Image (tube, rainbow, N blue to C red):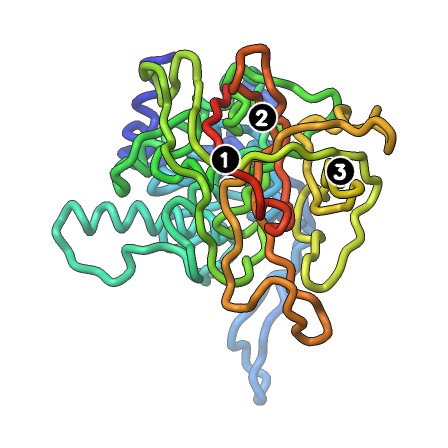
Amino acid sequence: MQRECSHMKDIYQNCTIMLAADRAGHSNSGLYPIKQVSKEAVLPFRGPSGEQISQFTISSRRLSTFDSDVIHGVLSPRGWTLQERVLAPRMLYFGKSQLHWECRTSIWNERTDFKRISYTSRMLDDAREMIAAIGRKNQGIPSSRDMVGTGVGYTEYTVWYDLVSAYSCRKLTFPEDRLKAILGLAQLFLGIISDVFVWGLWNKDLAAGLLWSVHAAAPITRLQAPSWSWASMDGELTFYIPSTKWGRPLRGSLETTCDTISLTDSEGPHGTYQSGRFSCRCPVMLVALLASAKIEENEEYPYDHLRQEPNAEVRDVGNKGLVIGTAAMDDDSLVQMSDPLHPLKLHAAMFYRQHPLLADGQIVNGREQVLLSYCILLKPLVEDGIFQRCGYAEIQSSAFSRVETSSIGIV
């Protein structure tokens, strides 16, 4: 199993065609679509003088669609099938009542009459464009399309976060395969970026990759991975920086507030590290958290695009308990038992902050501009200076105005 995982990219990307049994609920269900008994009527098409020019057929047979067979078919929720669909150059899907063809340029089925249909999501389009870019690069073909995606801050890393977000919605028979089932896509990215794969993230973009939240069914499931890695949680993920298809565009530019990032132990197989300890220097402050049933939505900071609304308020410990931000806890049971007299106290480590042209507190269009910092929430462990991740938070940057930079370790 370990040996095959490292070759997934080559297996899928170099195949001639991949066959997918999209109607099969289990391994004994068979491959071919079920033949439907239908009534048909052949009607002539006549010209002005009454002569028959052509004919067409009316049938009572209702065909399944690409959307029902593939996008929402029995294979679509399975974790291992995402990289198959992204990497394979051609796919032939055996649907409920017809066949579907998908390649890197078109999607067809038996009844499209040679007209292309388009159901492919932007996320897959970007990943396939990366495959094409690698091919052009290897052949020395110049191209202006080697940067996928659009918009400020949209990079190859953003495509990765999009893929992981989509992958996190899928299910695995064995949750411990959460990282293994996406290694083929990781190998694809290694072909276009010069970076190191680290527990599902990328070494040069760790400060951004750490800013995620998870929406998971209770009780929360912790997996064998460092707490700072998305691979440690079994649930649907939202990444925040840079903005992705699941996140909102960020106002102004961003600046990182985290440096001296390092992994303190030896590398293991498939982008893992033995202890998974991550160390860095960044501003860290003590905050109080209280459960929030509903965060009020406004035009400037809408939450309806997110899979998970913030489930906690962040309050200033030393300034009369003022609300200074919102948080999405990895396990919301941590704040459910808290009350205003005994709030949950955690440390907020700031990794990014907004640095727009407008000054903090300036009134624009009747609204006060509030600069935000993007943080992960940490709880201290027994060893001094070592923490475990507990959630994600967006906190007013002004709250960090007198906070000094500290060296921390996260496991």
CA gap, disc 1 and disc 3 = 19 Å
Name the residue nearer the viewer: 246 or 102.
246
**Number of numbered discs:** 3
Q: Quadrant of residue 2?
A: top left
Q: Quadrant of residue 212?
A: top right
Find residue 220 and report its horizontal and vertical position in percent: 69, 22
Crowding around mark 2 (Cα neighbors within 10 Å: few <14, some 14 to 19, many 20+) is: many
> Marks 1 and 2, Cα distance to the nearest angstrom?
10 Å
Q: Secondary structure at mark 1?
A: loop
| Amino acid at pointer 3 | Ala
Q: Residue at x 59, y 84 (%)?
A: 50
Q: Which mark is residue 389?
A: 2
| Callout 2 secondary element | strand
Q: CA distance from mark 2 to mark 3?
A: 15 Å
Drawn side of residue 120 relative to residue 37, left or right: left
The residue that mark 1 highlights is 210
Res 34 seen here: no
Residue 297 falls left or right of residue 184: right
Query: Badge 3: few (under 14), some or many (20 or more) residues near its Cα, within 10 Å?
Result: many
Lower position in the chain sequence, tag 2 or tag 3: 3
Looking at the picture, which amino acid does disc 1 mark? Answer: Leu
Q: Are marks 1 and 2 in contact (CB under 8 Å)?
A: yes
Labels 2 and 3 touching (C-beta < 8 A): no
* Residue denoted by label 3: 312
